[in-house]
Image: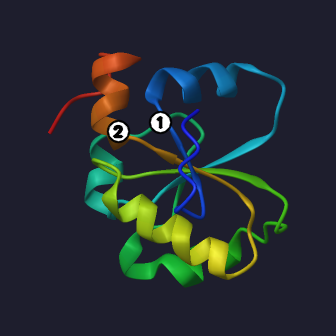
Amino acid sequence: MNNENALPFKSISAPELAELLKQDTEIVLLDVREPHEYAYCKLEGANLCSMSNFVESFEALLLKPESIIALYCHHGVRSARAATYLHEKGYTNLFNLIGGIDAWSQEVDSGIPLY
């Protein structure tokens, strides 16, 4: 995992996240893409918290500040913004998927369609 000191979250590659998800650690997956993107493809077990409705969707999950949260979007930009927001709200165990679901499809599961 790449710890970038200037960022309030940890960047994680698709293979690293795949390994982390295989462990017994309880990780909350947040997909911050829009509903039409989520309907097209998603990671198994992901919660949709689209950027257009992020605050309300996230608050409905009732997560604790110490929860381990991995966020992703299409390429990693929107999820980085969402992770920064969550950090500002007191969440500390945040991971942003580098390259988003696009990287996941190319590096972990080619069954996830590219778009």
- For the point 56% across and 24% down, the residue is 16
> What sort of colour scheme is used for the picture?
rainbow
Q: Residue furthest left?
A: 115
Cα–Cα gap, marks 1 and 2: 8 Å
Q: Is residue 96 left or right of residue 3?
A: left
Q: Quadrant of residue 105?
A: top left
Task: Give yes or no for contact between labels 1 and 2 (Cβ–Cβ under 8 Å).
Answer: yes
Q: Which residue is mark 1?
A: 43
- State which quarter of the image contains the C terminus: top left
Q: Quadrant of residue 88?
A: bottom right
Q: Position of residue 39 (x, y in %)?
A: 33, 49
Q: Is residue 86 above or below residue 112?
A: below
Q: Is residue 112 visible?
A: yes
Q: Is residue 108 above or below residue 66?
A: above
Callout 1 environment at 10 Å: few (<14), some (14 to 19), or many (20+)? some
Query: Element at badge 2?
Result: helix
Q: Position of residue 67 (x, y in %)?
A: 80, 56
Q: Position of residue 100 (x, y in %)?
A: 36, 43
The residue lying toward the viewer, choosing from 51 and 10, is 10
Q: Which residue is mark 2?
A: 101
Sequence order check: which comes first, mark 1 or mark 2? 1
Q: Is residue 112 left or right of residue 42?
A: left
